[in-house]
Amino acid sequence: MVVVTGREPDSRRPDGAMSSSDAEDDFLEPATPTATQAGHALPLLPQEFPEVVPLNIGGAHFTTRLSTLRRYEDTMLAAMFSGRHYIPTDAEGRYFIDRDGTHFGDVLNFLRSGDLPPRERVRAVYKEAQYYAIGPLLEQLENMQPLKGEKVRQAFLGLMPYYKDHLERIVEIARLRAVQRKARFAKLKVCVFKEEMPITPYECPLLNSLRFERSESDGQLFEHHCEVDVSFGPWEAVADVYDLLHCLVTDLSAQGLTVDHQCIGVCDKHLVNHYYCKRPIYEFKITWCRRKMSLKSERRGIHVDQSELLCKKGCGYYGNPAWQGFCSKCWREEYHKARQKQIQEDWELAERLQREEEEAFASSQSSQGAQSLTFSKFEEKKTNEKTRKVTTVKKFFSASSRVGAKKAEIQEAKAPSPSINRQTSIETDRVSKEFIEFLKTFHKTGQEIYKQTKLFLEAMHYKRDLSIEEQSECTQDFYQNVAERMQTRGKVPPERVEKIMDQIEKYIMTRLYKYVFCPETTDDEKKDLAIQKRIRALHWVTPQMLCVPVNEEIPEVSDMVVKAITDIIEMDSKRVPRDKLACITRCSKHIFNAIKITKSEPASADDFLPTLIYIVLKGNPPRLQSNIQYITRFCNPSRLMTGEDGYYFTNLCCAVAFIEKLDAQSLNLSQEDFDRYMSGQTSPRKQESESWSPDACLGVKQMYKNLDLLSQLNERQERIMNEAKKLEKDLIDWTDGIAKEVQDIVEKYPLEIRPPNQSVAAIDSENVENDKLPPPLQPQVYAG
């Protein structure tokens, strides 16, 4: 802004903002004239302004009333146009302010009518409001997004120790590594943890909290540094790990960097006894420059942030959609809290109902107590009321409804075929013998484990009328109690505990499988039918739509794809949750090998998930939802929380969720094409032969060839149908034409039929040539 003044502006104010007093002081003494004013003296103060003021803000022209500019006294505009200071004018007589005028219109709109800018211009208008020192506009903008969210974010980062230093360290490390490797990107490991969580593999959530109270000597045993480049945490704010990750990505992106991050596991460093560090470790990929990509490579693929696979509480374990994004441990904590709250509410409701019934009974007894004849009826009513009250209270705390028990009885009544029974009995006997032989090596501990397992199976036999969630809770409690007993009493090492728990799971789930897998009391079967129908409807999805980096034309890759499909289908034939997880793990490893062979480099998580979705769509595994729910409910929780089994299972859950919510945007299609493909009206257009790359998949080429043949057959069938309809119409028209012609002839030449009224002798009466005929023969008589 060109301002004729004899003082330097106060550099201590941010963004050049001024208060009204500062502005008045800056305009007191005139300075050297500008080039447009050279040759004549400056006018004397004060300067007078017209009622309608023309403005030139950095080349943008505005016109407003003088009262609008003076609306708020403590602003720079009010001071400038107060008449006490000189404002230069341009050649057209407009008052000139040397400031970008792009957003000055939003400032004027606020001064005129109090209108606020849209969200996308809030930050820019806020800078203008700071420059012109418009306090009311600043206050209102600070309560709008994104400034309000930025205030909250900065308050959260203020509680984060050394956040800015760590952020600068990330940038510096990434820069040095990129320069050393002469690469356009660099990778580094970052540890982000909210609370200290050294946890044993089978820690009881009800007995041990996330925070550990230790003495100073014990605390030194747990102090360690994870093998990472930068570490954030712990902190006391409510915000979780994902909030801090979002702040890191936002601040790094603001510096012009491209940031990708994914969770690569936990520290898992042994601390003391059975305690391990469970801080989550993230891999950050900082890209300094983007290489040019073709239009085909710019297609948006399927990307799931690996941090989304972890527990929502930030404990470092893998979450599960069936547990609302929590891991098994955190979910049990939340479940127990909700259960205790529900029990408390049920008790309060039962007590309230009891008081109401007692008050109603007391009022009825007092009003009719004088009638001795009906005393027996009152006693009967009192007994009935008491019985109904007890029944009502029992209903609140009953394990399950009568409907569940009836369904269980019906299920037991449906006896399977003898061959299935024999097969199940043989497998059960084999597993029992293997379990007993395995426990013999543990002597006394093995006997105790076998005794507990038998008692658990007997208890589960009487709990078949419970809901499947309650049976799952009992099973998980049994797993946890047995593991704790072995660790505390038996002093069994964690490695052997894992093996024992695997054998226990195999033994009990082989026996309980037919009762707890896809029970009739749940909607698992309904979900199975829905996902199968969904996958069949998506038969037209191609690998290119999912950006699958697999070339099935390579024989080894094709074999890997077939093996992956076989493994995911074979999952349904297993009875033990661990065996089902093993099928998922083998399928995932085949996928990684196929990607590695195709790309000649290790596969990433962004490559794995789209390929897994493609395998599920191509294989359409039977009873997919039932198997996922069965694993979630009855698998050893340590397998789902950590390790490769938990990682692959979590990815499978994400793949199924993606298939259920798959839309046109996910496949880079228009909504119209997506609807036509889903309805079966058409199939994806065939790719032109000249556009195929040399390394294109042979199977994809054959698929497009078959689609082309189907399209041609469809066109031919439509053409034949049109010709058949045309022939039918021609036949109908020809028949109608012949009938009309016959009718016209009949009407033109009617048929006359004369009655038979002439004698036989008159038959030849009309013959005009009778006289030329010889006379008739006469009979001759001969005398003999």
Image (spheres, grey):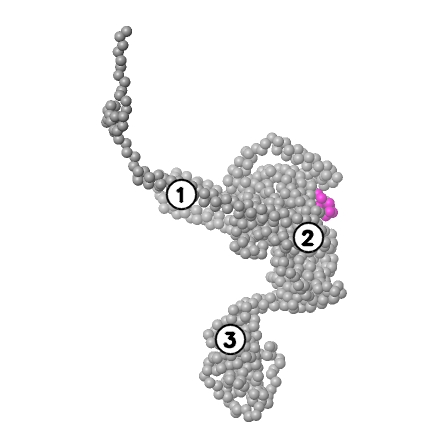
Q: CA distance from mark 1 to mark 3?
A: 75 Å
Q: Circle 1: is it few (<14), some (14-19), or many (20+) Cα within 10 Å? A: few
Examine the structure image and report whether residue 496 is included in the region drawn in magenta. yes
Q: CA distance from mark 3 to mark 2?
A: 57 Å
Numbered badge on residue 695: 2
**Residue 411 horizontal/vertical position (percent):** 55, 36
The residue type indicated by label 2 comes to: Asp
**Residue 725 horizontal/vertical position (percent):** 45, 44
Numbered badge on residue 642: none
Identify the image quadrant of residue 728.
top left
727 sits to left or right of 593: left
Q: Can you identify the residue that label 3 sits on?
A: 105
Which of label 2 and label 1 is nearer to you? 1
The prevailing secondary structure element of the residues shown in magenta is helix
Q: Residue at x 65, y 55 (%)?
A: 606
Range drawn in magenta: 492-500
Numbered badge on residue 733: 1
- Front position in the image: 7 or 639: 7
The residue type indicated by label 1 comes to: Asp
Q: Could you tell me which quadrant the C terminus lies in?
A: top left
Secondary structure category for the residue under label 3: helix
Examine the structure image and report whether residue 430 is included in the region drawn in magenta. no
591 sits to left or right of 370: right
Q: Circle 3: is it few (<14), some (14-19), or many (20+) Cα within 10 Å? A: some
**374, above or below 245, in the image:** above
The residue type indicated by label 3 comes to: Gly
Which of label 1 and label 3 is nearer to you? 1
**338, above or below 5, in the image:** above
